[in-house]
Image (cartoon, helix red, strand yellow):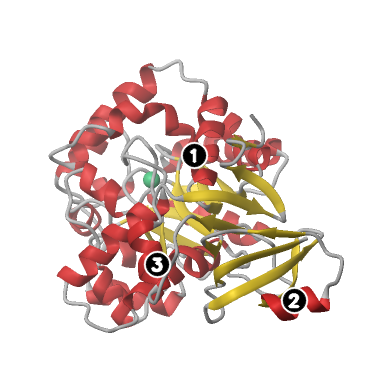
Amino acid sequence: MIHSAPLILPVSAPVLREGAMVVRHGRIAALGQRREIVDAWPGEEETRWDGTIVAGLVNAHTHLQYTHMAEVGRRRYASFEEWSTAFDDVYSGSSIDWAASARDGARQVLRSGTTSAADVVTDLVAATALRDTGLGGLPYLETLGDTDAGWAASGRERFVALLEQAGLPMGISPHAPYTLDTGTLRDLARLARSRGLRLHIHLAEGEHEREYTVSGTGPLARMVRELEFDFAILREGGTGLTPAAFLDELGVLGPECHIAHGVHLDADDRALLRARGTAVALCPRSNRTVGMDGPDVAALLAEGNPVAVGTDSLSSAPSLDLLEDVAVLRDLAVRQGYRAADLDRRLVEAATLGGARALGIPGGLGPGGPADFAVFDIAGGREPYRALIEEGAGRCVATITSGKMAWDSRTSTTVGC
Ligand SMILES: [Zn+2]
């Protein structure tokens, strides 16, 4: 099958005008000028798209199972702690079917042109949503609220059993530096490394996280005490380390680990993440919902940190359309003084190649790589990356994963319905 369009953005290679690609057994067999491809592959069936073909977007941080908690995400909050309380009220008192909620989320993600996601799974029944809908990427099994004593007594055994029970490849997601005890965080990193699994953790999301790890005080410390989690960091009066340095000390950071949010990172933290090869999945609309300004995307780009983009879940974001977050990041970067002419390309790279790197999967479009791409109803013009960022949200007409149609607006179907 040949797919052709007036414009193709492989992202891993220069923009192709009047391009085409050959898809065989779920992979790209060839990519180039349409005329040459059609001549070289006579008799191959051709799907001619109007608009722009783009390498699959990668949503590097979401929780698809919270899709049916959208009522929480539609409100605005004065602080992270206020949002957290609203979230817990709905999560713990709900009778939501997490598996169905996650599948709905996966379909929404596919409809936005996203072909892979890092999906944090709190309840194991939600783990198959990616596989069930044709969405690529990796589910990460989350844990939180474990004290070292509880972890040693039964928590570890229970967590490992769930990983094995899943029956599919999963990463490990320790929730955050303030919701797990110190030894448990260290052991989760060890567990991931010993089994060759990837890691993903929320880091530096709220402004009080630093106070918590440095001195074991502040609103997060109060929240942890109210939840009656007897963590070492509270007993010992903190670690004197920033949240990033704290995780590094515990062996959590590394190229197979990526973090979500990274709003409150100082220059040393950013340097540490670069040194460890740890990517940051930025989720600016979620940050806004919980009452924050957003990450320092200008500094992260200028300093060369590995950057990806995530929507977070509908419990803190208005949609699962990744390009809406990319557009907000663009505005933020400009306001923060990012002046280089490469901004649009680099943000699209973050939303594709950056996410793929964070998850440890191939990204971009090229011969031999997976046929993961989306078609957008946009002309592109002279600045195709900019056009995608400014006009792409809500304009995806088809999403193809591993060469198969996973979302087709012409028939309004997603698979796994
Ligand atoms: Zn999250």
Q: Position of residue 114 (x, y in %)?
A: 52, 52
Seen in the picture, residue 275 relative to 215 is either above or below; the reply is below
- Mark 3 and mark 1 lie on one chain; the one further toward the N terminus is 1
Q: Are marks 2 and 1 in contact (CB under 8 Å)?
A: no
Q: Position of residue 120 (x, y in %)?
A: 49, 44
Seen in the picture, residue 95 relative to 215 is either above or below; the reply is above
Q: Residue at x 22, y 78 (%)?
A: 338
Asked whether 45 or 30 is in front, the reply is 45
Q: What residue is disc 2 on?
A: 37
Q: Residues within 10 Å of mark 3 (few under 14, many from 20)?
A: some
Q: Quadrant of residue 330?
A: bottom left
Q: What residue is disc 1 on?
A: 108
The answer to whether mark 2 is within 8 Å of ligand 1 is no
Q: Quadrant of ligand 1?
A: top left
- Mark 2 and mark 1 lie on one chain; the one further toward the N terminus is 2
Q: Is residue 416 left or right of residue 186?
A: right
Q: What residue is disc 3 on?
A: 248
